[in-house]
Amino acid sequence: VRNKVLRYWMDNRGTGKKELYRYNTQLRDEFKFVRDLNSHACQASVENIERAIKRFFDNCKNKIPGKKGYPRFKKHSRSVEYKQSGWKLSPDKKSIKFTDKKGIGKVKLKGTWDLWRFEQKLIKRVRIVQRADGYYVQFCVKVENQEQLEATGFTIGLDVGLKEFYTDSDGYSEPNPRFYRKGEKRLKFYQRRVSRKKKGSANRKKAINRLGRTHLKISRQRDEHAKRLARCVIRSNDLVAYEDLRVKNLVKNHCLAKSINDAGWYQFREWLEYFGLKFGRITVAVNPAYTSQSCSNCGEVVKKSLSTRTHICKCGCQLDRDHNAAKNILTRALSTVGHTGTFRNAWGELASTLLGYDLDEQADSLNQESP
């Protein structure tokens, strides 16, 4: 449904919201698979493409640098989203039954230990998602997601890196787990198995699925690691400062691209901003220029190459390179005048204060916390 509505929008310039929903109704008369699907599920697909179109035009209007996010076609059978009809949850909330004519029927649920806390009327959306290791049912629940914590009196600056995942302004360094590097040998093994199978065969599909599960495991490890660290940092400090790194520019260096992508810096930043809003903490993104070169003690610029890991200044300050940078990041954040902290921009997305930049030049979309 999503792809057909998108094609209709591409072929008919100036098509508005009402025309998209009207075309969605016409699809029910033309195609049996649309007629069998719950009407609210079809509407949800139209809502998704409508948001994608709006985001594209907003990015063009606000002159967002780089790609503007032109809506693209998606592979079939990846997900389907229901609203408050087309499904029925069992009284013990251990299974769910889909009542439309698609033939999904009753599905047993695993890992529903949190679901019993919420009344069924609070569940606003149900989504079936296909992953490499199986199918998942996601529940969108309307609850208050903010939690106020007591002030700790601590502030911290974070300098992310490749040798260490991050070094804070107190001198503590968090090791870099390097999930992709550790799983690279296994990935190569499954990639060779895929290349040796005959195209179109059942064995090739099995090999592709096994390779996909390995990639999925690495992705989940990286996301869980970033989430765990971000939550810990936010809960322990009243203000968290970090660099506003443009990762998509940094990965243009082919010598460091793999290591930068493996570190997941932007993913870590997203979780910092998410938990900052959730727990009422201040997060500040500062301009990264000269944070490693400037002396945190006297402010003198001490030029050094990437291989130089120790900062030594004429004033007598001698620190680890990343520790010095983290202290500079915190100093810049504390010198912020005016509004600081996370907030929702005009698109309902999270952003954070950045020194020396306009607010509309900042953060991209934020992933939501998984249950």
Image (cartoon, rainbow, N blue to C red):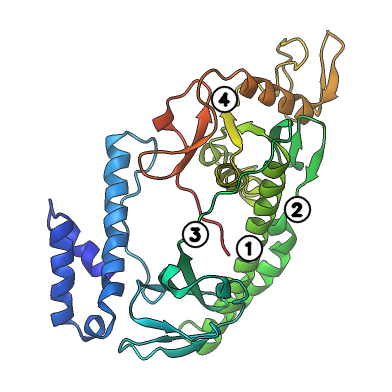
Q: Distance between the residues labelled 4 and 2?
A: 26 Å
Disc 3 vs disc 2: Cβ atoms closer than 8 Å? no
Q: Which of marks 1 and 3 is nearer the N terminus?
A: 3
Q: Quadrant of the N terminus?
A: bottom left
Q: What residue type is labelled 1?
A: Arg
The answer to whether one can see residue 305 in this image is no
Please name which of the two marks, 2 or 1, marks the residue nearer to the observer: 1
Mark 4 vs mark 2: give the one in front: 4
Of the image marks 2 and 1, the number of the one nearer the N terminus: 2
Earlier sequence position, callout 4 versus callout 3: 3
The amino acid type, in three-letter code, at marker 3 is Val
The residue tagged 4 is 287
Q: Which of marks 3 and 2 is nearer the N terminus?
A: 3
Q: Residue at x 45, y 47 (%)?
A: 365
Q: In the drawing, does residue 100 fall left or right of residue 262?
A: left
Secondary element at image label 1: helix
Residue at 49% across / 86% down in the picture?
A: 90
Question: Which x, y percent locates residue 13?
Answer: 13, 52
For this rendering, which residue is in front, 309 or 300? Answer: 300
Q: Gap between marks 3 and 2, in whole Å?
A: 34 Å
Looking at the image, do the residues carrying marks 4 and 2 touch, with CB atoms under 8 Å apart? Answer: no
Query: Is label 2 in a helix, a strand or a loop?
Result: loop
- The residue depicted at 70 percent of the width and 12 percent of the height is 301
- Dot 4: few (<14), some (14–19), or many (≥20) neighbours within 10 Å? some
Q: Residue at x 73, y 41 (%)?
A: 236
Q: Which one is in front in this view, the residue at disc 3 or the one at disc 2?
A: 3
**Within 10 angstroms of label 1, few (less than 14), some, or many (20 or more) residues?**
few
Q: Which amino acid does label 4 sit on?
A: Asn
Residue picked out by circle 1? 220
Tell whether 366 sits left or right of 291.
left
State the residue position of label 3: 143
